[in-house]
Amino acid sequence: MSDTQTARPVSTLALPLAALGAGLIFGLGLVISDMINPAKVLNFLDVAGTWDPSLAFVMGGAMGVTALGYRLILPRGKPLFAGSFSLPTARQLDPRLIGGAALFGAGWGLAGFCPGPALSAAALGMGEVYIFLIAMLAGMGGWRWLVK
Amino acid sequence: MDAVTPFTPVSALIGGALIGLSAVWLMAANGRIAGISGITGGLIGPAVPDRLWRLAFVAGLIAAPLIVMLAAGPVEISIQAGPLTLIAAGLLVGAGTQMGSGCTSGHGVCGLSLFSPRSLASVAVFMAAGAATVFVTRHLIA
C-alpha cells in the first residue's frame, strides 16, 4: 500500500512529522472541547437525564472544517508527502459494519471513552484510563487476530 | 453519580474546528483519514510497513494534554465507571471499532465529511447504541 509511495525523494521523516503535528492538533481539540472527559460524553448520550449537547457542537465544528478542507484538497490529486490519497473503498452496508458500530456504541456508552480521548487521557496518569486502554488494545488485537 | 456538565458551545466549536483542522492536515500531508481506531489498530495488527507515522500520531495525541497542563494548569476529567465496567467497555470499543472499521473520528468526522453512506449508518448505530446503553445503566438499573 504505502511502500510504493516513496518513489520520489521526500524525506522519510515527513510522514511521521506530519502525523505528529496532526495528533497534537487533534489532542488539543479534544482537551479544549473537553471531549477528553468521559462525563461530558456520557451526558451527551444521556438524553433522558443530565443532557449536555456540547458533543454535537464538537462534531459540527469538526465536520464543517473537514468537509470544506477535503473539498479543497482532494481535487489536487495527491497529498504532499505520499503518492496518493488513501480513501476507503468499501461501499456496502454489511452486518460487520452495523454489528461493529453497535458493539462500539455499547462500549462507548458504558465508560464514555472512544479511542481518541482514551489515548489522549493516557497523559493524565489515571489508573482507570490505563485499564480501559489495555482492554481496548486487547479488543483491537483480538478482533484482528480472529479475522486474519 | 451522573454529575451535570455545563453546556459549552463555544469551546466545543473551537475544539471541534481543531479536530477538523487535524483531519484536513493529515489528508493534505499524508493522504490519510484521521480515524483513531484505524490508525491505532494498524499498530497492533500483523506487520504493516507504515508503523512510524501511526506511532507519531498517537504520540501527538498523548502529548497534547501534557502541553496544555504545562501551559495552562491541570486537565481534569471525571471517570464514573468502575474497573470491571472499564474492562468490558474497552473490549467492546476495541473489537467493535475494528469490526466496524471506524469510530467517532473515522466514521464520524471524516466519513460524514466525505458523505459516506457507510459512515452515516455507522454513526447512527453507535450513537443509538451509546444512548441506549446510558439509558439502561443510568435510568433502568441505576
Image (spheres, coloured by chain):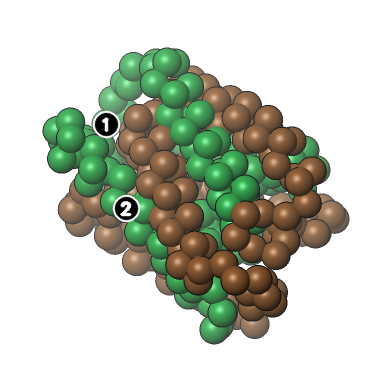
Chain colours: A brown, B green
Q: Quadrant of residue A67 in the image?
A: top right
Q: Which residue is mark 1?
A: B1
Q: CA distance from mark 1 to mark 2?
A: 27 Å
Where residue B3 appears, as percent x and y from the top left, is: 28, 25
Q: Nearer the viewer, residue B49 or B44?
A: B49
For label 1, count other residues whose C-alpha is less than 10 Å away and answer few (under 14), some (14-19) or many (20+). few
Q: Nearer the viewer, residue A134 or A13?
A: A13
| Quarter the C terminus of chain B occupies | top left
Residue at x 80%, y 59% (from the top left corner): A89
Q: Which residue is mark 2?
A: B62
Figure check: B13 above or below B34: above
Question: Which of label 1 and label 2 is nearer to you?
Answer: 2
Residue at x 51%, y 68% (from the top left corner): A11
Where residue B106 appears, as percent x and y from the top left, is: 61, 49
| Residues tagged by mark 1 and mark 2 found on one chain of the structure | yes
Q: Earlier in the sequence, mark 1 or mark 2?
A: 1
Residue at x 48%, y 55% (from the top left corner): A18
Residue at x 32%, y 22% (from the top left corner): B5
Figure check: A84 above or below A116: below
For label 2, count other residues whose C-alpha is less than 10 Å away and answer few (under 14), some (14-19) or many (20+). many
Q: Is residue B41 visible?
A: no
Q: Nearer the viewer, residue B3 or A127?
A: A127
Q: Is residue A93 left or right of residue B134?
A: right
